[in-house]
Amino acid sequence: MIATKPSPAQPNFSFSQYDGIVIGGERFRYFETRDNGHMFVAASGQGVPQVMTNAEISRYLTAGKFECTPNQYQPEHLREHVLPDGELLSLKGTKAQQKAAMRLAVVQAFREFLEDDEHNVTRTATSVRPYLGAIKYRAGEIQAQSDPDDESDTLPVPKKLGAKSVLEWERLERRFGLAGLYDRIADRGNRDRRMRADELMIMGKVVGKYLDDQRPSQAIIFEEVKIAFAKENERRRVAGEPEILCPSRETVRQAIRKLNPFDMTLTRKGREAANRQFAPVGMGLDVTRPMQRVEFDEWEADAITMMAEGGLFHHLTDEEKKALGLDKKKARWWITVAICCATRCIVGMVVSRQPNSQSALRVVEMMMRDKGVWGDACGALTPWNQFGWPSVIVTDCASYNISSLIQARMSDLGITLEYSPAGNPSTKGHIERVFGTFATQLMPRLSGRTFSNIVERGDYDSVKRAALNPEEFCSVLVRYIVDIYHRTPHSGLNGETPHDCWNRLVEKFGVQPPPDLGRRRLLFGQERERTVTREGITNLGIRYHSEVLARFMTRSHERKVAIRWYPEDIGAIWAELNGRWFEIPAVFDRYQGVSAQEWAHAAAEIRAQNARNAEVNFAVVRQALDYIQETNSAAMTRVGLIMEDWSEKRIDYEEDRLFIGFKTSETEPENPYDQDRDGWGTRLPTAGSAPSDGRAEEIQPGEEDSASGKFGPIQFPDHQPGDAADAADDGDDWTLEDE
């Protein structure tokens, strides 16, 4: 908006009793001017008069709240220099403008001859006729002078110019000004075919069939019109009535063209096409800060990837490969993407074989995590550091997005979840535009591209051209998003890149920090049921125990509890004890920061190397996890973008396959090859913990007394998640021992 400052000296406004005055949207009439200002009365004759000074009128004019239409209420016989209908001359069409300019030039030329004493010209047709040629030539010169850019040689003055026309144009211009030289000839005449009411009714019934989703052509409608008129004439001949004339093809075509365009698109192409073409566009979204509004949606990538067994996928069984679609077949992936509307940055992405509630929840989780680990694993040169706590999330009405799981978790996070209407993707246009960018900018660079339809694909064999494996496909997506999309000037950001826009807005507004690890475990964890034993809770072969859990076991008869475990970090779980949730840590701290995927691969490696041992020393577990992290960290991270199936069936299968009879010893004997390890991790202190001196042989408990075998006395650390005050049961100090 232009900054304005009123002048110190205000003008003295003048008004007429015929002026139309609008103040603040209400109509007034001017009454009189007094010392303290101008008085206006309501046009309806009711209400309090309005008195305004010149300064107040000036301020209202600047704000657009004061309108004055001169001579709006002037009597008809006093009106001059305006069209009868009050239409503005500048809004007339080009042909009307040219015709009026030609007539004005003729009038000016005639008046030159009229004022010249050398010519005996008066306002009579007899005196004008001898000078018609000179008047036409002079009118052409006047038009050429008024429009010097016109290089045409022909004069726009009519060849057959009559004296009466010259006199009539001069009279109209003298009375009405330029407005008198405009006519309404272009609006004359009825160009429609003259048809009777019964004929129009028969044709209208048939033409209405054009509004059908079968999309009949105009030729078909015309044939049906002929058939309808033929049947009507046959009936009339039998009844002895006069026959009617069938309309022509052009008449039917004109009748079809008069149909409402919105109705035609809605009935022939559907609501989505009609909304796309005719839905009005307002001011759009008013989003100013990062993560204020996030849109996410799913897209079936226009590329077929090779489901290769390379990388980490050789650890999977045939059933797992089949579940993930990695059984040497070629298929397409679904990509679930989330975008920050204020910065256009991609803040979450998950690749899955089929979108579901877990993939949607995983994308929400990625919005709140620093994704630099994925960028580093894929070799990105730009940090993928766009994360925060979103305020509003907008998605479509897919069944998995409107599930009770998603709605409950979003409510727990305090996030407003909005759904775009079905068939109206424009309400989340930012994410839809991103998918269009992927399809046009990224997919043409990949072999195995499927194209958007068979016409575009032509003879291109997408299946035979597929060459990327899932790890490579994830790397390509991450590198494109982080290094290309985030670094490319965006037209929606006035040429600023999404990366720079994020940094600028974060510097200005900041972002709300994401939830802590414990809250993420509770809100994004997967729920299942487990039985509490003296050894605690076992999930995927890992024992979880705490003082709170031990108290619960001694006080409660119900041993089955609901737990939530977090596949991204299996160092702790949450358990529902007597209606309250408590975080239960793993017995060994070494599992902190370890994902379920890493642990499953490490367990498979350990199982293969120690098939005969029912109990595995924890040092072996530690070394296997270190090996997995050191040798396959990058590949594991890339695969982490793929939504794995951690359903109840998958977990039961893993436990049956890997963890039945699989235990890790809680007493970690001294290893002569581990002398260079300085205080790795921590151990759970037990009553039978062996000292490091030579007396270990004397006090080392037997197999039947160890915590991994029989459940002996336990000592818990001083600080456990959920102290005695928050425990499932508040009792006295206690010691749990075998009976």
Image (cartoon, rainbow, N blue to C red):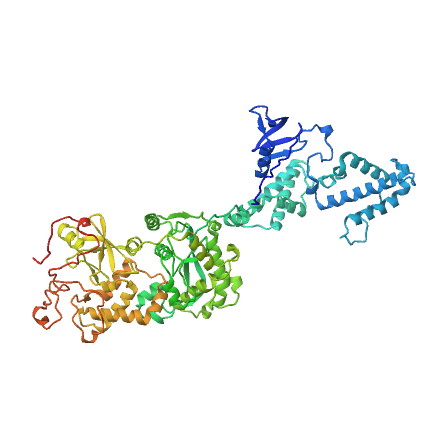
The quadrant of the image that shows the N terminus is top right
- Return the residue nearer the eye: 331 or 503: 503
Across and down, in percent, residue 354 comes to 38, 59
The x and y percentages for residue 726 are 20, 49
Q: At 9% across and 71% down in the image, what residue appears?
A: 695
Q: Quadrant of residue 563?
A: bottom left
Towards the viewer: 318 or 215: 318
Residue 672, image x and y in percent?
18, 75
Seen in the picture, residue 466 relative to 419 is either above or below; the reply is below
Rendered residue at 71%/29% (across/down): 76
Residue 678 on image: x %, y % = 22, 70
In the picture as drawn, the residue positioned furthest to the front comes out as 8
Give the residue at the far top of this rendering: 46
**Quadrant housing the C terminus:** bottom left
- Decide if residue 701 is on the left or right side of residue 122: left
User: Residue 395, can we see it?
Assistant: no
Between 152 and 266, the residue placed more toward the observer is 152
- Taking the image as shown, residue 19 lies to the left or right of residue 295, namely right
Q: Is residue 342 left or right of residue 713?
A: right
